Image: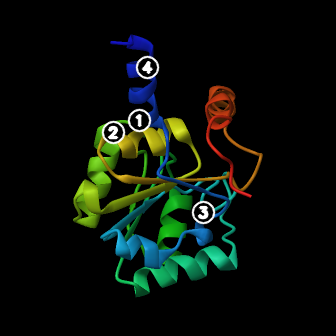
Amino acid sequence: MDGGRTLRKQLARLLKPKLYVSHIFEVSLEHLTQLGMKGIMVDLDNTLTPWNSEVLAPETIAWLKAAKGYGFKVCMVSNNKGERIDRIASFLEIPFVARANKPLRRAFIRGLEVLDTKPYETVVIGDQVFTDVLGGNRLGMYTILVIPISRIEFVGTRLMRIPERALLSLIRRPD
């Protein structure tokens, strides 16, 4: 048995998103419904808003409203802390998990508890492979990677983008 091939398959299973799009609002809610999804866990920084910002694009707000209209339960899961998350979640009228410590399993388990969904019927949408995609894939969730909204981000995230770029070069980038 080829150990290298096995390792590559395991890494691909953990690090490759099921879908890769430019923006959250490009995700087809109809497609998620057809897949049997019931819950959506969404990251905050550089997925819904630019990093450390409270600015939401009108298309993002409309997409989240439409998701709720489709019957999806939506929850924001963020490693960030503070009042900003609370304000954004309140504005969007969705629950949130702050200081989540993604990609730890408990971060996603907390999100599942908030959503009251099972992993196989839950979507994770985020901009980072080593937090959002890895954590969601470890629990068997449907993972969607988006291109970060902004190039401005936390220094630790910037460092993780180096190996992430190498990995993403193997995955077809959205147009």
Structure colour scheme: rainbow
| 131 lies above or below 8 | below
Q: Please, what is the three-letter code of the amino acid marked with disc 3?
A: Leu
Measure how far apart labels 1 and 4 are at the Cα level: 14 Å
Residue matched to label 2: 138
Q: Residue at x 59, y 49 (%)?
A: 127
Q: Tell which circle, 1 or 3, labels the residue nearer the N-terminal end.
A: 1
Question: Where residue 48 is drawn, which disc sits there?
Answer: 3
Mark 2 residue crowding within 10 angstroms, few (<14) / some (14–19) / many (20+) = some
Measure how far apart labels 2 and 3 are at the Cα level: 23 Å
| 92 lies above or below 145 | below
Tell me the element at label 1: helix
Viewer-proximal residue, 33 or 51?
33
**Which numbered disc, 2 or 3, marks the residue closer to the eye?**
2
Viewer-proximal residue, 175 or 91?
175
Left or right: residue 171 compared with residue 95? right
Give the percent coordinates (x, y) of residue 91.
Answer: 53, 77
Q: Which residue is farthest bottom?
A: 69
Mark 3 residue crowding within 10 angstroms, few (<14) / some (14–19) / many (20+) = many
Q: Please, what is the three-letter code of the amino acid marked with disc 2?
A: Arg
Tell me the element at label 2: helix
Measure how far apart labels 2 and 1 are at the Cα level: 6 Å
Measure how far apart labels 1 and 3 are at the Cα level: 23 Å
**Which numbered disc, 2 or 4, marks the residue closer to the eye?**
4
**Which numbered disc, 4 or 3, marks the residue closer to the eye?**
4
Question: Where residue 5 is drawn, which disc sits there?
Answer: 4
Q: Please, what is the three-letter code of the amino acid marked with disc 1?
A: Leu
Residue matched to label 1: 14
Answer whether labels 2 and 1 touch (C-beta < 8 Å): yes
Left or right: residue 76 compared with residue 20? left
Q: Tell which circle, 1 or 4, labels the residue nearer the N-terminal end.
A: 4
